[in-house]
Amino acid sequence: MRTVQVTGPDVAEWVEVPEPTCGPGDVLLAIKACGICGSDAMYTAVGGIPPHQGATILGHEPAAEVVEVGVDVTGIAVGDHVVVDTMAFADGLLGSGGAQGAMAPLVVVKGFQPGKQLKVIPPEVPWDVAALNEPMAVAMHGVNRSEPKPGDKVVIFGAGPIGLGALLGFKSKGVAHVVVVDILPTRLDKALRVGADAVINSAEEDVATRLVELHGQAPASVTPGARPDTDVYYDAAGAPAVIHTVLAAAKREARLTIVAVHKHPVEIDLGQILTTEITIRMSMGYPTEIFQVTDDIVGNWNKYALIISDRLPFDRALEALDLAKTPGAADKVTVVFD
């Protein structure tokens, strides 16, 4: 079968490999859709991931159909539609340096354990939307790290896939108001359609001033100046200006969660933020969220579908990779299989 593999620095190409077989304790999956992550471009740029450097099969955002189960397998059946915990495979991380990747027609789950690697979803959820499960778990982990409470007022910086996923995640937690900040009008329009209460174009408006209008002014404290009564700041943008904006505006005991990858060091003035007692939390991956987020996707798949900007067939997967890594060309690219 054909797979998409990183074969060297800045080289991704089609590679023929044997089809996987299904042993007595295994489950064989037919991949139906697979999202492209920003890390796929990083893997390609560096030439793969050890221990398979130079031969990394891509694809870690899959949705699939069960096509064969081993004789010893219980708890799943042929024909089931499933989402996948790509970090729970016995042969390494699926599509992230393991022996297999989901940019391939077939994947085998070795040593299947009910509730561990797969979760069954209703067949009415479109395959490409189901394939959002993995990145939405990343977004939800950041939401959980923020410890949202009913009544909280939230700001999300970055209206890309993770930011929009966080928007839906915060809404599922019952917060009172969510503002999304970006510099692209098309992204802000999409955020409103997904469910943002308000948006701010930070290229045209002062974020802190606008937040005071939207969230009100925080009660006076030892922190000088008029500050917005915003409880949670969520960085899904990865721009230094986001950190500087938040730290200059944050009220006392606000919370900042950083999900975005900052590619360069960001200088902060600890003296400036001492009196705010702001809590800064980092968020990476999805230690427990991979299947926690699934029910919300199932219940609101029409909203999650808005996150996808481009859908390309598997035979155009190399083109999809190029599209996804080109700045400004697309937001969320998904490869769909026959």
Image (cartoon, grey):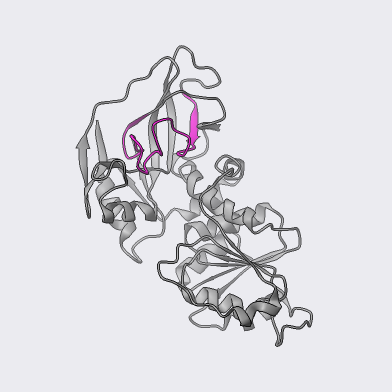
Between 328 and 110, the one nearer to me in the picture: 110
Which residue extends farthest top? 71
Specify whether residue 81 is painted magenta. yes
- Judge whether 27 appears above or below 159 on screen: above
**Coordinates of residue 277 in the picture (x, y in percent):** 70, 73
The magenta-colored residue range is 79-107
Locate the N terminus and report the quarter of the image it occupies.
top left
**Coordinates of residue 23 in the picture (x, y in percent):** 39, 17
Residue found at x 28% / y 52% = 44
Left or right: residue 324 versus residue 227 is left
**Coordinates of residue 135 in the picture (x, y in percent):** 48, 49
Left or right: residue 30 versus residue 306 is left
Left or right: residue 27 versus residue 294 is left
Determine the image quadrant of residue 68: top left
Determine the image quadrant of residue 200: bottom right
- Judge whether 213 appears above or below 118 on screen: below
Between 322 and 237, the one nearer to me in the picture: 237
Left or right: residue 292 versus residue 224 is left
**Coordinates of residue 212 in the picture (x, y in percent):** 68, 80
Locate the C terminus and report the quarter of the image it occupies.
top left
